[in-house]
């Protein structure tokens, strides 16, 4: 099945708008959550944005003549300002639905300008299904301390995960559990310079060669290449936000040799660590003279 670039781009752009708004909103604008519908979709015209996750079969969405076919493993988004319809096309089908009220959104007019519907391939359908279920549990469950905060955090996590790319460009395979286990170990022990492919493979419970194939298919690079990228991003963060020396940064991100760290960092970022830090420093601001102090 083809995935037009414009359709995928539209979905991610619209999710980004929602994330920017929800992140600063006092409460999450969730008005409806259902993790596993089996009946046809029918939403009356109202100022809502809906997100769907199809987990079985396929459905066709219709937003005032704007149509989009959504199959298992795909997400879709549509505004409900003109009424939404969805029907089964490859049964049996199942889909989750989240409705967000955009009535108080700062760009409320944008969402209601015209019918909108687009889709996106889910990067991790099992993970998204779990997020739908947890959001539904929090939304429909009994009151508890910080419930609104938990709902908002869960919604933001779901939105960010929904817009995640499947992998590197050109890859349509979800990330397998063996790769996730290896990435977890990388994240936890990236400061260990002795972390190597053999240890990653043992932790992932596969052979080294099989782990390399899994990474290439789902992430687009080798495990050790991915580890290098993680270490360099961590180094960038430390250089920007800490007074640590270059040698200390190198050690904390898993390089026993400062010169080798500097060489790798330059290859990845185009700048030496010192130059990178200087490029991120804010210019000093001279204090203004008070009115009384002026002559």
Image (cartoon, rainbow, N blue to C red):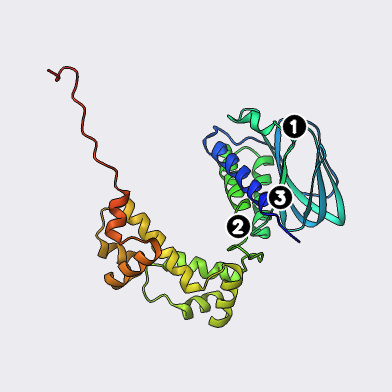
Identify whether 276 is placed above or below 78.
below
Give the side of residue 281 with respect to residue 120, left or right: left
Residue occupying the point 71% across, 34% down: 48
> How far apart are the two marked residues, 1 and 2, measured between alpha carbons?
28 Å
Rendered-image quadrant of the C terminus: top left
Q: Position of residue 241 (x, y in %)?
A: 32, 50
User: What residue is disc 3 on?
Assistant: 119
Gap in angstroms between the C-alphas marked 1 and 3: 18 Å
Residue 87 versus residue 171: which sits nearer the camera? 171
In the image, 218 versus 68, the foreground residue is 68
Q: Which residue is mark 2?
A: 165
Q: Quadrant of residue 196?
A: bottom left
Q: Residue furthest left?
A: 295
Give the residue number, with chain letter if any, for mark 1: 81
* Residue positioned 44% across, 65% down in the render: 229
Q: Secondary structure at mark 2?
A: loop
């Amino acid at each position: 099945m083809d995935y037009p670039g414009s359709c995928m781009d539209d979905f991610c752009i619209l999710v980004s708008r929602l994330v920017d708004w929800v992140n600063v909103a006092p409460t999450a604008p969730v008005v409806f959550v259902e993790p596993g519908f089996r009946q046809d979709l029918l939403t009356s015209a109202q100022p809502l944005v809906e997100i769907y996750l199809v987990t079985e079969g396929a459905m066709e969405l219709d937003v005032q003549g704007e149509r989009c076919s959504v199959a298992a493993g795909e997400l879709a988004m549509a505004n409900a300002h003109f009424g939404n319809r969805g029907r089964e096309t490859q049964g049996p089908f199942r889909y989750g639905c989240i409705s967000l009220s955009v009535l108080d959104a700062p760009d409320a007019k944008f969402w209601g300008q015209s019918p909108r519907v687009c889709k996106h391939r889910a990067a991790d359908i099992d993970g998204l299904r779990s997020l739908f279920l947890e959001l539904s549990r929090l939304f429909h469950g009994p009151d508890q301390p910080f419930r609104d905060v938990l709902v908002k955090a869960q919604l933001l996590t779901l939105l960010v995960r929904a817009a995640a790319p499947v992998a590197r460009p050109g890859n349509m395979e979800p990330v397998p559990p063996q790769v996730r286990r290896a990435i977890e170990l990388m994240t936890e022990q990236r400061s260990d310079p002795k972390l190597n492919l053999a240890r990653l493979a043992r932790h992932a419970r596969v052979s080294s060669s099989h782990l390399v194939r899994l990474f290439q298919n789902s992430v687009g690079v080798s495990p050790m290449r991915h580890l290098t990228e993680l270490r360099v991003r961590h180094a960038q963060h430390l250089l920007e936000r800490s007074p640590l020396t270059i040698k200390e940064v190198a050690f904390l991100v898993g390089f026993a040799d400062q010169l080798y760290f500097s060489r790798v960092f330059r290859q990845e970022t185009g700048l030496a660590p010192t130059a990178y830090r200087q490029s991120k420093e804010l210019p000093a601001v001279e204090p203004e003279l008070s009115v009384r102090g002026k002559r």
